[in-house]
Amino acid sequence: MRDKTSVYMRWAKDHAAARYNLANSGMLGCSMADLEIRIEDLLLNGPNRDGYRPLLEAIAERYGVAPEQVVTAQGTSGANFLALSTLVERGDTVLIEQPTYEPILAILEFLGARVRRFPRRFEDGYRLDLDAIGDDVRLVVLTNPHNPSGVLLSTEEVAEVGRLAERVGARVLIDEVYRDVYEEEPRSLVHLGPHFVVTSSLTKSYGLSGLRCGWILAEPEVARRMRYAKDFMEAVNPLPAETMALAAFRQLPRFAARGRSILDPNIAVIRDFLAEHGEWLECVIPPRSLMVFPRLRKEEDSEPLHDWLRRRETSIVPGKYFEYPRHFRLGFAVEPENVVQGLKNLSEGLRRAG
């Protein structure tokens, strides 16, 4: 029997790390010193039946929903698995963007869904190209901001997807894990209607991956079903992690400021780099993002470039993990000096190849 796995996630765990890590998919990780917390704020045991209530309330307040609409999970990966395993039955038709984040496709394969695709084309700036949804579709899946391009769809564009889905009785699942990079006070797309479900976490925008604080926002009845499905996976979440996550929520403005101090200089460097390397690369550059998804002009596959960079302690994500081999994902929410050196190595690799 073939192993059930996400090929990207396995690659990321085994090969993404490097001294000059341009494969990083989120904000530079925080240290314990960055999280202001007292030992007495931590709980080892306590009331945590369906999530630590103060944490549920903190998430609900930030995103403008009721606590009954919040289901906590182990990061956005755990949230996506829990949401999809609740919403999708074996044989259901699921409509999902292309390119997209490969682990979502892997989950759908594991669940036995019938996957149907719709394009988000480089030539169209990765905007949506969806004007109809078949009557058999039960779920539409988007990442917004888009992974791997970083492009953020407008509320109006996503609302139109919602109208198309509602006509056939389908739900819309949106992975919003990068949304906080764009807005100080993000209004989640869950507010577009009861058929919308969103997932997110503290991981990508804030550098708090180790807390594994993820969540799903959904209408109360769907959230209830997800809490019941969660019972198959774990009795309760680890309470020390949830009390630490609550402390982080109370400090989000400070973590957001930290993120801007890291990201803003790097965005300028990336823009200049892409402009200077137009002979070798073309790229849709979002107004603000942690990553971009350049396309090689002269080569058909980014894997040889990746292999050459690995020998120079530099990493990128080959485009094959997003079904677009000519592309690669370039992440830059890491130390500015490492971005600069990583880009120097990337520049040498591009010039040698073409």
Image (cartoon, grey):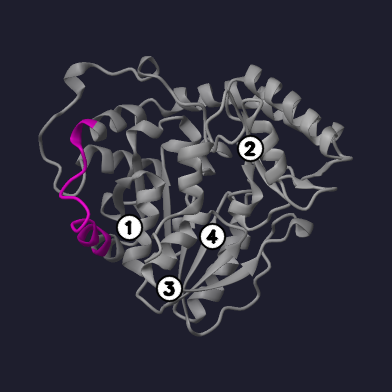
Q: Position of residue 240 (x, y in %)?
A: 21, 30
* Disc 4 versus disc 2: nearer the observer: 2
The residue segment tinted magenta is: 225-240
249 left or right of 227?
Answer: right
Q: Which kind of residue does numbered mark 3 sit on?
A: Ala
Q: Position of residue 164 (x, y in %)?
A: 56, 75
Badge 4 or badge 2: first in the primary sequence: 4
What secondary structure is found at the residue carrying circle 4? strand
What secondary structure is found at the residue carrying circle 1? helix
Q: Which kind of residue does numbered mark 2 sit on?
A: Ile
Can residue 185 be spotted in the picture?
Answer: no
The residue under the point 42% across, 29% down is 252
Badge 1 or badge 2: first in the primary sequence: 1
* Disc 3 versus disc 1: nearer the observer: 3
Residue bearing mark 4? 142
Residue bearing mark 3? 113
The residue under the point 85% across, 33% down is 351
User: Residue 185 or 202: which is nearer the viewer?
Assistant: 202
Residue bearing mark 2? 316
Residue bearing mark 1? 82
Q: Is residue 324 above or below residue 114?
A: above
Q: Residues within 10 Å of mark 3 (few under 14, many from 20)?
A: some
**Label 3 to label 2, Cα distance in Å?**
31 Å
Question: Could you tell me if the residues under marks 3 and 1 are in contact, i.e. CB atoms within 8 Å?
Answer: no
* Disc 1 versus disc 2: nearer the observer: 2
**Label 3 to label 1, Cα distance in Å?**
15 Å
What secondary structure is found at the residue carrying circle 3? loop
Can residue 279 be spotted in the picture?
Answer: yes
Q: Which kind of residue does numbered mark 1 sit on?
A: Leu
* Disc 4 versus disc 3: nearer the observer: 3
